[in-house]
Image: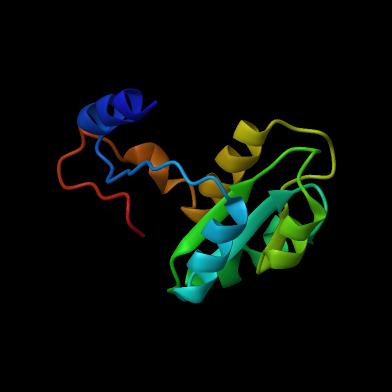
Amino acid sequence: MEKSLKEVEKGWGGGFSLRFVPSYRKVIEDWKGGGGLVIHLTMKGSHIDDVIEEIRSSTAPKLVVVGSKKVPGEVYDRADLNVAVGSQPHSEVSALAVFLDRLFKGRELHTGPDLKGASSTY
């Protein structure tokens, strides 16, 4: 997995990092303890259109948790925001894609290694 991620970063840019952490609880608590915002994508929660501006305007680092139907209830409790990407079943990848598209206002589709001076930071 680490090798694949490095290849993606090499070809497309990024600043990705990867590390194994045996406890999601610790990741969430450390993130929050460092002043970060924990955003849980789900089908139950505040509609994305109602909270995306709040998320976008926050200067806090963002941790996006994407789960499935087996997400422990405590993830909902620990998240700062539970964001409903839709009310119909969808894949975790599609939920993340929709979230990122809304977060970056579609501009992420115009960035990449072939675009001189483009930035993926908004």
Colour scheme employed for the rendering of this structure = rainbow
| Residue 76 in the image, given as x and y percentages of width and height | 76, 59
**Number of marks in picture:** 0
Q: Residue, x 74% and y 38% (percent of image)?
A: 68
| Residue 46 in the image, given as x and y percentages of width and height | 77, 62
Quarter holding the C terminus? Answer: bottom left
Instruction: Judge from the rendering whether residue 122 lies leftward or rightward of residue 100; answer left or right.
Output: left
Instruction: Judge from the rendering whether residue 15 lies leftward or rightward of residue 24; answer left or right.
Output: left
- The front one of 106 and 34 is 34
| Residue 20 in the image, given as x and y percentages of width and height | 44, 41
- The front one of 2 and 93 is 2
As drawn, which residue projects farthest toward the left?
116
Quarter holding the N terminus? Answer: top left
| Residue 61 in the image, given as x and y percentages of width and height | 43, 66
Instruction: Judge from the rendering whether residue 2 lies leftward or rightward of residue 86; answer left or right.
Output: left
Q: Residue, x 49% and y 62% (percent of image)?
A: 62
Q: What is the quadrant of residue 9 in the picture?
A: top left
Q: Residue, x 21% and y 37% (percent of image)?
A: 115
Instruction: Judge from the rendering whether residue 102 lies leftward or rightward of residue 35; answer left or right.
Output: right
Q: Residue, x 67% and y 64% (percent of image)?
A: 79
